[in-house]
Amino acid sequence: MKKNPFSLHVSLDDFAPATDAEKAYMVQMRPSTTFFKDGMKRLLKNKIATISMIVIILVTLAALILPVFWPYSYDAMLGVNPGRPVDASYNNLAPFQFGETELERMAEGEKIFPHVFGTDSAGRDYFIRVVYGTRISLSVGFFASIIVLIIGMTVGSIAGYFGGKVDLIIMRIVDIIYSLPDMLMVILLASVLKQSGLNEAIEGTILEKLGGNIISLFIIFALLYWVSMSRQIRGQILSLKEQEYVLAARATGAKGSWVITKHLLPNCISVVIISTCLQIPSAIFTESYLSFLGLGVNAPMPSLGSLASDALNGITTYPHRLVIPAVVISLIVLSLNLFGDGLRDAFDPKLKN
């Protein structure tokens, strides 16, 4: 029978049970997924974030892999040979230039790998020093951000969830640390730790290769740089803990740690991701200006900051030695910021619809 379009009667045909074929079709069209898979799909649709992620991966892989195959070492002075006078022709070479000894060997038919970025004032290959400097700066930024994430997330979660006197005491400590001048305290702590015999304390341990200055930098981040993340997470949890799903979890007898890890922190993921991604370039900048002041990595190990500092002596004659590490720092920081924005848009539960 043809249904009257103006009729208010409900058609029972619309409520007929679905057939097995229709059920199979719906299952095929809507495959099961997870929060991570769903977020990654949205992330890959963001072209800017995807390009930034590729840049970060390529820079990281280059910093890890290239030193294995590169024929020059970051600390090898090419003009210094045992039993022979120092060959000054290797010092301050321009990109793709060669020293006198290398030119003689090339004239004899030997193939010499070029110095892509030239050499520095000590005759060391500048390309491999930039690669090692990138490795050091990325390592410092990554591990410092992990330290800040763990401390800031733990302290902010406890203060925001429990509130009362616990929140009052923690926030007063945060306010005291906030009142300290960051740069002055960083320089002061770095100087004190450098004179505290930390290098002697780690001698013979697995931390010796890192050097006392890098460990001092990690200690500085653990003492000072967690306060911003803790305040942001605390503010988020203060607003989220009054939601109905938190009340329902408490009513079922859930412990505070379970509520924080299963309900509150996942809904703070945008703040955590953005703060962590911004902390990495902040750590790189901190390491750079400490190395610029002579409080960074131990020589001859390079970092991007120490390379820029050394390049100031010949900025008018060899400007590329300052431009190259500055461009690498800018590229890393820009890519991390854009990638952090993409992660926030992809994994924020409030934006997933």
Image (cartoon, rainbow, N blue to C red):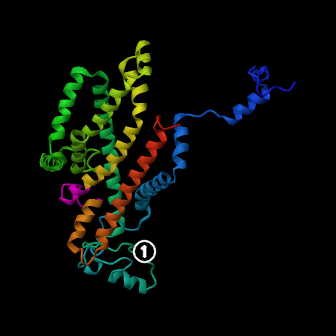
Q: Residues within 10 Å of mark 1 (few under 14, many from 20)?
A: few
x and y percentages locating residue 304 in the rendered image: 30, 60
Q: Is residue 129 visible?
A: no
Compare residues 243 and 127 and report the one nearer the observer.
243
The span picked out in magenta is 288-303
Using the image, determine if residue 322 lies above or below residue 350: below
- Judged from this view, the residue extending furthest toward the right is 1
Using the image, determine if residue 126 lies above or below residue 13: below
Q: Is residue 294 magenta?
A: yes
| Residue at 24% from the left image edge and 55% from the top image edge | 297
x and y percentages locating residue 33 in the rendered image: 59, 34
In the picture, which quadrant includes the N terminus?
top right
Task: Identify the residue position indicated by label 1 in the image.
Answer: 113
Using the image, determine if residue 13 lies above or below residue 146: above
Q: Is residue 239 visible?
A: yes
Type of secondary structure dominating the magenta stretch: loop
Element at label 1: loop
Q: Quadrant of residue 131?
A: bottom left
x and y percentages locating residue 93 in the rendered image: 31, 78
x and y percentages locating residue 279 in the rendered image: 32, 46
Is residue 36 shown left or right of residue 102? Answer: right
Q: Is residue 197 magenta?
A: no
- Amino acid type at image mark 1: Phe
- Judged from this view, the residue extending furthest toward the bottom is 107
